[in-house]
Every structure is written in structure tokens, then in C-alpha cells.
Image (cartoon, rainbow, N blue to C red):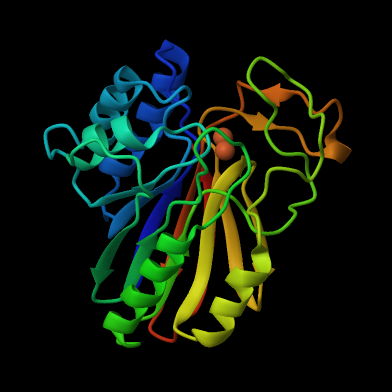
């Protein structure tokens, strides 16, 4: 069995507000009497993708001094910038290719995939990333169930996506998802060992399905837009910080729990 904590969209921008919200949820996790096997952070970690924002992210997530009590697994989102991300969060040389990483536990493997497209808001898994997913799953050979994690949901979540910088309303409902979802669906069709998908980008947590697998968009830390039937669709910057826990059991079933901090 694998227990994962999941947060998304920290959007650290140097403001005390963004840092406090991210710290609040990370502190809660560290105080738990039982620690999760890992913390998954599905992108939009920085707001503008600057080096300073990633240095702050590394401090908040405990990656700067190896102080995190559990592995912290991250992937980039549309607000992230690959080169400073690699350097500050992964301790790797700054380079521009997709950032794909895998962590294998006794109870499952978590593939953190890069769906960001530099300079664009919409997402895509590129050739290199598809090749990496297939090769990684080949190597695992079905020994444990696998979760795919990336930033952009491949399906419509029936609420508008986060608005652009400085805009509290939503101009293009349904836009900015993962491009070419059919290709991902075809991969899932060939790979029964993939037990589910977790994403970010949405900000309000959401649970749905994709290609017959559970799909959970994790709660965004920075702010939460109201849903269309809740009113004005303005970003709520005061709502409690969300946190999800995913349990991947030995039957390969994904169960998700939601909390606020
Ligand atoms: Fe975001
Ligand atoms: Fe995003």
C-alpha cells in the first residue's frame, strides 16, 4: 500500500501570503503522527518561474537542506520554468528539456511527467516524455501499480480554468487542458498497470475518470476559484488550503481523501 499526500499550484511569487499558505500545508504534513510515503506536488510551484521563487519553493518543501521527512515528488506546470526548476528543486544542471522523474516504492511507482510547454498555458506530453513513460513502465514490468502525475488535466473538469495573471474572471472556459488526450488514452489502453492519474492546474480539487482510470486534480494551494454554480467565479484567496491523500492499495485501487488546513 502506498499513501501519498498531494498538493498543487503553490504559485510562490515572493509574497508572504503565498509562502504562508504553502508553509501551512507542509507544516501540517510534518506534524502528522503517521507520515505519508511521499508528497506529490503537481506543478505551478513558482508563479513566474524565477530562480528566487524556486529557492523559496525548495525551502518551503524542505528540499534545500534535505530536511523533508518524506520524498517530495514534483513536476512542472505552465507557470514553471524548467532550467531554474531543475537547479533548485532537483539539484541538477539547468537544462531546458522535459523534467520527468520516477520514484518506486514497495506499494507502487509514481511517474512525475512534464506536461508543460515552454511559453504556453496549455499542456502536452512530448515525444521524449511518452518514450520515457513507456521505457519506465517496461522496466517496472508490472511489478507494482503505477500512478501518472502531471500538471494539465486531460479532460474538461466543468469549471473554468485558472484565470491569467491579474485577472479574476475566466475568459475561456474549457481551454488550456492537456493537448492530444487520445494519445494518452491509447497508452492507458496498453498499460493496465497504470492505476490512476493525478494532476494539478485546476485549483479546486476534482475527481473524475479518464480512459477508464480514476483522475484526481489536486487542490491548489494558492487560491481557489468558485465553481460556475457558486456565483461570481472570482478567485477566493482566503479559502482554507486544500490537501489530498491518495491511497494506492495492493489491488491497484486508488482511493482519495480531501482535507483543508
Ligand atoms: Fe495554477
Ligand atoms: Fe497551471
Is there any visible trace of residue 57 in the rendered image?
Answer: yes
Quarter holding residue 106: bottom left
Depth check: 228 or 87 in front?
87
Image-based side of 91 in relation to 132, left or right: left
Residue 41 in the image, given as x and y percentages of width and height: 41, 46
Left or right position of 33 against 121: left
Which residue is more in the foreground, 2 or 173?
173
Q: Is residue 194 above or below residue 4?
A: below
Which residue is pictured at 44% across the width and 83% down the height? 193
Percent x, y of residue 89: 25, 37
Q: Quadrant of ligand 1?
A: top right
Extreme-top residue of the structure: 15
Q: Nearer the viewer, residue 236 or 15?
A: 15
Instruction: Look at 61% across and 27% down and name the residue there.
Output: 239
Q: Is residue 153 left or right of residue 252?
A: right
Question: Looking at this view, is 179 or 13 the one in front?
Answer: 179
Query: Could you tell me which residue is drawn at 52 percent across and 59 percent down?
Result: 198
At which x and y percent is residue 92?
A: 18, 41
Residue visible at 70% across and 24% down in the picture: 235
Note whether 48 is above or below 14 in the view shown.
below
Can residue 248 be seen at all in this image of the molecule?
no
Q: Residue 197: x and y, percent?
A: 53, 65
Q: Is residue 69 above or below residue 38?
A: above
Quadrant into which the N terminus falls: bottom left
Amino acid at each position: 500500500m502506498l499513501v501519498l499526500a498531494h498538493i498543487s499550484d503553490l504559485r510562490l511569487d515572493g509574497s508572504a501570503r503565498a509562502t504562508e499558505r504553502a508553509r501551512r500545508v507542509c507544516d501540517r504534513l510534518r506534524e502528522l503522527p503517521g507520515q505519508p510515503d511521499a508528497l506529490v506536488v503537481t506543478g505551478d510551484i513558482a508563479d513566474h518561474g524565477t530562480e528566487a521563487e524556486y529557492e523559496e519553493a525548495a525551502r518551503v518543501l524542505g528540499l534545500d537542506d534535505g530536511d523533508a521527512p518524506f520524498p517530495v515528488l514534483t513536476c512542472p506546470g505552465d507557470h514553471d520554468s524548467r532550467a531554474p526548476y531543475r537547479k533548485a528543486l532537483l539539484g541538477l544542471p539547468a537544462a531546458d528539456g522535459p523534467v520527468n522523474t520516477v520514484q518506486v516504492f514497495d506499494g507502487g511507482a509514481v511517474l512525475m511527467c512534464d506536461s508543460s510547454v515552454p511559453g504556453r498555458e496549455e499542456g502536452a506530453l512530448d515525444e521524449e516524455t511518452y518514450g520515457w513513460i513507456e521505457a519506465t513502465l517496461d522496466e517496472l514490468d508490472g511489478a507494482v501499480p503505477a500512478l501518472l502525475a502531471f500538471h494539465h488535466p486531460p479532460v474538461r473538469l466543468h469549471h473554468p480554468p485558472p484565470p491569467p495573471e491579474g485577472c479574476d474572471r475566466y475568459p475561456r472556459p474549457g481551454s488550456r487542458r492537456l493537448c492530444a488526450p487520445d494519445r494518452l488514452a491509447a497508452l492507458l489502453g496498453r498499460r493496465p498497470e497504470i492505476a490512476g492519474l493525478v494532476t494539478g492546474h485546476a485549483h479546486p480539487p476534482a475527481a473524475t475518470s479518464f480512459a477508464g482510470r480514476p483522475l484526481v486534480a489536486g487542490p491548489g494551494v494558492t487560491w481557489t476559484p468558485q465553481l460556475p454554480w457558486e456565483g461570481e467565479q472570482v478567485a477566493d484567496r482566503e479559502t482554507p488550503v486544500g490537501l489530498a491523500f491518495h491511497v494506492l492499495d495492493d489491488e491497484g485501487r486508488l482511493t482519495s481523501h480531501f482535507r483543508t488546513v
